[in-house]
Image: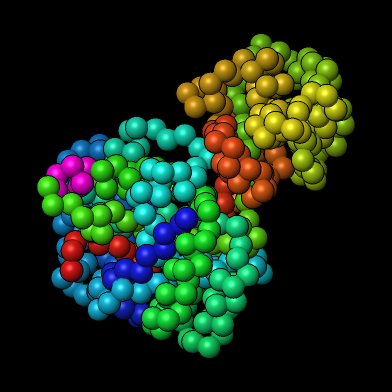
Amino acid sequence: MAVLKPFKGIRPPAELASRVASRPYDVLNSEEARKEAEGNPYSLLHIIKPEIDLEPGIDVHSESVYEKAKENYRKFLENGWLRQDERDYLYIYAQTWRGRTQYGLVGCAAVDDYLNGVILKHELTRPDKEDDRMRHVMVNNANIEPVFFTYRAVSEIDSIVTAWVKEHDPEYDFMAADKVRHQFWVIKDRQVSERLVELFEAIPHTYVADGHHRTAAAARVGLEERKNNPNHRGDEEYNFFLAVHFPHDQLTIIDYNRVVKDLNGMTPAELVEKLKAGFEVVEKGEEIYKPARLHEFSMYLDGKWYALIARTGTYDDQDPIGMLDVTILSEQVLKPLLGIEDLRRSERIDFVGGIRGLGELKRRVDSGEMAVAFALYPVSLEQLMKIADTGNIMPPKTTWFEPKLRSGLVIHSLDES
């Protein structure tokens, strides 16, 4: 049964919220972060990408970078740019994008839920990335950024959230540069919070949508703190970590596409001919073509778009992994035809989030940087949850959730208070 724990959030004053809030640490590189935070001393990027305040080119995993994060976090607290609430609360975080709004409940998830399989994942993590986030949490003694969770929608939770946002003004309400509207409420009624906690106790599983490394790192922090605390009780703040929980039916997964540098010694005509063994190949011309359903792909090659429709019998719709379009593409095209065996390590392939549009695929091929591009139909939430429920792991770079959470609207401190 899932834990949803109220906590004393550390938040910016309302007049600074839009300037503190930033994109997550892992969606922009150091130079992009430096440019985005330029002229804005309040940006959380100074804490989550602290290398922007040091010499360009510095190793982002060096001790001085983590110490800079700690120094900047303390400065934010001392300057009143971040302030801690007086008591434990749950919060509501709403994002409106392209005419749709998703409402997330912000509270702490439990380390034990992750360790015991109540929180389910669908991706593998890399130890080096876990180490990085673990160090960041421990040096600040706080979860500076939330993880993005989902759960199978519960009508009473929906009703409570809807009633609260209808009856109360948000603490924060702003439009970010990415054209996403962000709103944030504090649930100050203890009875409402207690009921939401009870309802979560009846939810069998929550799912990591985005933030697998932050989740794994939070669990490792909890285990490390337990080991170092001879008086461990189980209710210390290090046993919990910051998460935003969205009902599954409000979320949007968009496409996550592939571009490949070369054709593995083939000509474009030879690749098209070989593809016909597993796909119905339909030339679509020069206009961008987007796949319209599962098991249909679009390919951009040599100035033309093609529809690739996987032939019946080349995939297994009863296999939660085998039915995924990323699996079909890997097993029928990337490995046997283009010679890409390891998606995680190959330098011949790159991945492009659908937020950039299919025009980005065309641009990268037309520039000569890449030889061919493949666009995929998005994975569904039901597919993701089915894979997690069965203990399976998705291939790398399968899901891209949009919009991304803004970091800095609330922080969870591990300090006891």
Point 59% across, 24% down: residue: 261
Which x, y percent locates residue 12?
Answer: 31, 73
Q: Is residue 121 left or right of residue 329?
A: left
Q: Is the magenta stretch mostly helix, strand or loop?
A: helix
Q: How many labels does the image show?
A: 0
Is residue 225 within the magenta segment? yes
- The one of 77 and 209 positioned closer to us in this rendering: 209
* Above or below 345: residue 61: below
Is residue 262 within the magenta segment? no
Q: Is residue 318 left or right of residue 352?
A: right
Point 25% across, 55% down: residue: 234
Which x, y percent locates residue 107?
Answer: 40, 65
- The one of 288 and 80 positioned closer to us in this rendering: 80
Which x, y percent locates residue 115?
Answer: 38, 43
* Above or below 45: residue 115: above
Q: Residue furthest bottom?
A: 167
Please say whether residue 22 is visible from this viewpoint: no
Point 42% across, 75% down: residue: 194
Point 20% across, 47% down: residue: 225
- The one of 346 and 394 positioned closer to us in this rendering: 394
Figure quadrant of residue 246: bottom right
Q: In this view, does 129 lie to the left or right of 417?
A: right
Figure quadrant of residue 286: top right
Please say whether residue 224 is visible from this viewpoint: yes
Which x, y percent locates residue 173?
Answer: 47, 78
- Magenta-colored span: 224-229
